Image: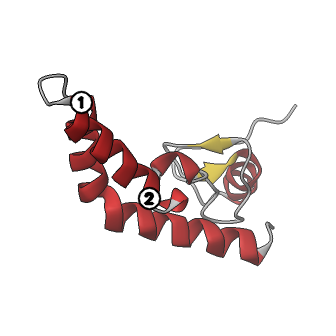
């Protein structure tokens, strides 16, 4: 199990990314548009730099929904390999059987 503080910090980041997604997208569109003047593009970059760092989607870490583990994460299942194996062994995931020989 991951530290509770790490899990909560990641949840706050996800929330902040969702709040600032529209504004960030507009500013990026202006900053990358070469038809705009240099001054407009530069001011858009400055406004982007003033935004909180945690508003950037790359700051969000993929974590297991069950345990909070940050590594060995399957995106399709939103679960780590260890949690997947445990639930598969118990028969709680339909269509999944853990092989043993």
* Vertical relation: 14 (above or below) 77: below
Disc 2: CA contacts within 10 A as few (<14), some (14-19) or many (>=20): few
Residue 17 at x, y percent in the picture = 41, 60
- Which of the pair 42/80 is nearer the observer? 42
Is 51 positioned to the left or the right of 69 in the image? left
Among numbered discs 1 and 2, the one appearing first in the sequence = 1
Q: Residue at x 67, y 70 (%)?
A: 7
Q: Residue at x 70, y 63 (%)?
A: 68
Classify residue 91 by image quadrant: bottom right
Name the disc covering residue 38, or none. Answer: 1
Residue 86 at x, y percent in the picture = 75, 56
Residue 39 at x, y percent in the picture = 24, 37
- The secondary element bearing badge 1 is classed as helix
* Vertical relation: 60 (above or below) 98: below
Q: Nearer the viewer, mark 1 or mark 2?
A: 1
Name the disc covering residue 50, or none. Answer: 2
* Vertical relation: 85 (above or below) 69: above
- Which of the pair 50/99 is nearer the observer? 50
Residue 44 at x, y percent in the picture = 29, 46
Q: Residue at x 45, y 51 (%)?
A: 49
Is 67 positioned to the left or the right of 44 in the image? right
Colour convention of the picture = secondary structure
- Which of the pair 23/88 is nearer the observer? 23
- The secondary element bearing badge 2 is classed as helix
The residues tagged by marks 1 and 2 sit, at their Cα atoms, a distance apart of: 18 Å
């Amino acid at each position: 199990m991951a530290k509770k503080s790490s899990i909560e910090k990641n949840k706050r980041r996800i929330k902040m990314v969702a709040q600032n997604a529209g504004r960030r997208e507009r500013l990026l569109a202006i900053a990358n548009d070469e038809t705009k003047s240099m001054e407009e593009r530069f001011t858009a970059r400055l406004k982007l730099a003033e935004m909180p760092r945690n508003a950037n989607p790359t700051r969000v870490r993929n974590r297991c929904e069950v345990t909070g583990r940050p590594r060995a994460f399957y995106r399709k299942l939103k679960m780590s390999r260890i949690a997947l194996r445990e639930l598969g062994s118990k028969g709680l995931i339909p269509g999944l059987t853990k092989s043993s020989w």
